Image (cartoon, helix red, strand yellow):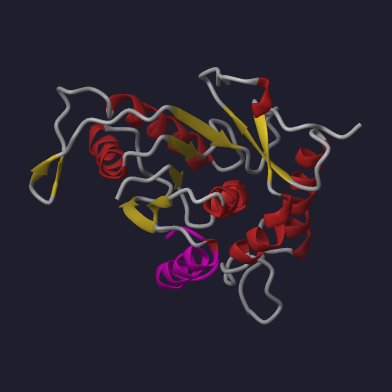
Amino acid sequence: MKLDILAFGVHPDDVELGCSGTLLAAIAEGKKVGVVDLTRGELGTRGTVETRREEAARAAEIMGIQVRENLGMADGFFQNDETNLRKVIEMIRKYQPSVILANAFEDRHPDHGRSAKLVADAAFLSGLRKIETYSDGQLQEVWKPAYVFHYIQDRFIAPSFVVDITPFMDKKMEAVLAYSTQFFNPDLNEPQTYISSSQFLETVKARALMMGKRIGVGYAEGFYTEKTPGISSFDAFIQQTT
C-alpha cells in the first residue's frame, strides 16, 4: 500500500500529541496515512506494554489511519545504528510516502531527538540504490520521500509552517485520550507523571491555540523542516484574518 503520509513516533502517543490533527485533516482530504511507532513505550511509568498496544490500536481507529506498525526498538536505549536504520528504511520503502512526519530534533524526552535524527537519516538512505532491503523475501524498491517534517511536541520551537486543524481538534483530543493509562484519568490508581495531570491536557490545547493564533485560526499544529518547502502558486497560502 502506497501512503501519502507516514508519521513516525518514538513512543505510542507521540503522533497523537504532535500531529494527529494534521493527519485527520489529510484523511478528510482523501489522503492515505499510516503511523509507525519505533518502541512499545515499555519504560512508561503508567500502564503496561499490553495496555499501550491496545490504546494505540484504539487511537488508530479514532484517527482512521490505514496502517499502524511497531518496530519494537528498545525504549530509552535504541540507537541510530545500522540495525535500526534498516528497520526504518524498510518501512519507508514498504509504504513509499511522499511526506514523512517525525519527532522534533530537540525536546524534553531524549528519545525524541534520537528518533528525529534516526528517521531523517533513514529517509535519505532509503533513496540509495546500493542499500538493499527486503520485505517478505523480495528486494524492495528504493524510495526517497519529498519531505521530512518534524512536529513540535513539548518544547516550543518556532515553526517553519503551521497546519489549520480547527475542525479536527476535538477528534485529536479523543485520540490522545485513547491512552487512558497515560493521561489524566481519576479512576486509575497509578503514579502521577509529567503527562498524567489534567493541566497537561490543557497545555496540549493551549499549544494548538497558540499555533492557530499565528495564522488567525482556532487551532493549528506546527512543523519545522531543514529543507525549504516550495510552492507553485501564492494560492497555496491560506488567507489570514486581520
Q: Residue at x 46, y 73 (%)?
A: 51
Nearer to us in this view, 210 or 220: 220
Characterize the magenta stretch by its predominant secondary structure.
Answer: helix
109 lies left or right of 184: left
109 lies left or right of 86: right
Measuring from the top left, give residue 48's x and y in whole percent: 45, 70
In the displayed orientation, state which residue is furthest to the right: 242
- In the displayed structure, 184 sits above or below 216; it is below
Nearer to us in this view, 64 or 102: 64
Measuring from the top left, give residue 24's x and y in whole percent: 58, 54
Magenta residues span: 41-62
Measuring from the top left, give residue 239's x and y in whole percent: 78, 32
Using the rendered view, name the quadrant where residue 144 is placed: top left
Is 188 magenta? The answer is no
Using the rendered view, name the quadrant where residue 127 is placed: top left
147 lies left or right of 153: left
Q: Residue at x 62, y 51 (%)?
A: 21
Nearer to us in this view, 206 or 77: 206
Is 52 magenta? The answer is yes
- In the displayed structure, 123 sits above or below 69; it is above
Nearer to us in this view, 186 or 76: 186
- In the displayed structure, 57 sits above or below 205; it is below
Name the quarter where the C terminus is drawn. top right
In the displayed orientation, state which residue is furthest to the bottom: 187
91 lies left or right of 151: left
Measuring from the top left, give residue 232's x and y in whole percent: 57, 19
Q: Residue at x 51, y 19 (%)?
A: 227
